Image (cartoon, helix red, strand yellow):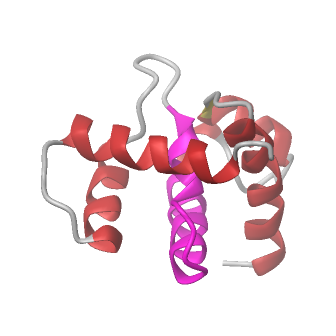
């Protein structure tokens, strides 16, 4: 994945995390304005953002992007959080724990 696209994605997601909000996949894709990324195929990019954040020792920023219907990430992201964090627990528990860490990390100083 193009590192410049990953960085653009991060720059969209950071203010969302700072404001303790979530962004839908459609809103994210629209802001990214990359013709190859749509609301339906954001998962690989968001997964790569999470991997980059984990490599840097930061919370998984991609968890602030969610489905517009249930305000939760796609199922694959739960598994990625478990894999990168080594956590056990049900989907909701894992998601809310990572979301809280992300919000706390990016909160304004």
Q: Is residue 103 visible?
A: yes
Say how many tags the image has: 0
Instruction: Provide residue 17's location: percent of width, then percent of height.
Output: 67, 41
What residue appears at the point 84 percent right and 74 percent down from the top-left corner?
A: 4
Task: Please state the extent of the stretch shown in magenta in the rendering.
Answer: 42-66
Residue 49 or residue 42, whichever sits in front: 49
- In this view, 80 is above or below 33: below
User: Which secondary structure is most common in the magenta stretch?
Assistant: helix
State the image quarter where residue 52 is shown. Answer: bottom right
Location of residue 100 in the rendering, given as x and y in whole percent from the top left corner? 46, 41
Among all residues in the image, which is located at the extreme top?
69
**Can residue 42 be seen at all in this image of the molecule?**
no
Q: Residue 104's x, y, as percent?
A: 58, 46
Residue 84 vertical position relative to residue 95 in the rendered view, above or below: below
Q: Is residue 56 left or right of residue 13?
A: left
Q: Residue furthest front?
A: 109
Instruction: Give above or below for 81 relative to 54.
Output: above
What residue is at 46 percent from the left and 42 percent from the top?
99
The quadrant the N terminus occupies is bottom right
The answer to whether residue 30 is magenta is no
* Residue at the farthest left position: 89
Left or right position of 19 against 51: right
Magenta includes 44? yes
Q: Give me the residue at 52% from left, 21% from top.
A: 68
Q: Nearer the viewer, residue 60 or 65?
A: 60
Closer to the camera in the image, 65 or 96: 96
Q: Nearer the viewer, residue 91 or 37?
A: 91
Relative side of 95 to 17, left or right: left
């Amino acid at each position: 994945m193009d590192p410049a696209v990953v960085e653009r994605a991060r720059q969209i997601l950071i203010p969302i995390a700072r404001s303790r909000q979530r962004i839908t996949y459609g809103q994210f894709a629209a802001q990214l304005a990359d013709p190859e990324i749509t609301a339906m195929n954001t998962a690989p990019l968001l997964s790569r953002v999470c991997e980059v954040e984990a490599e840097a020792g930061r919370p998984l920023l991609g968890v602030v992007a969610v489905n517009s219907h249930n305000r939760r990430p796609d199922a694959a992201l739960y598994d990625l959080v478990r894999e990168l964090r080594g956590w056990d627990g049900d989907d909701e528990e894992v998601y809310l724990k990572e979301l809280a860490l992300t919000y706390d990390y990016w909160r304004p100083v």
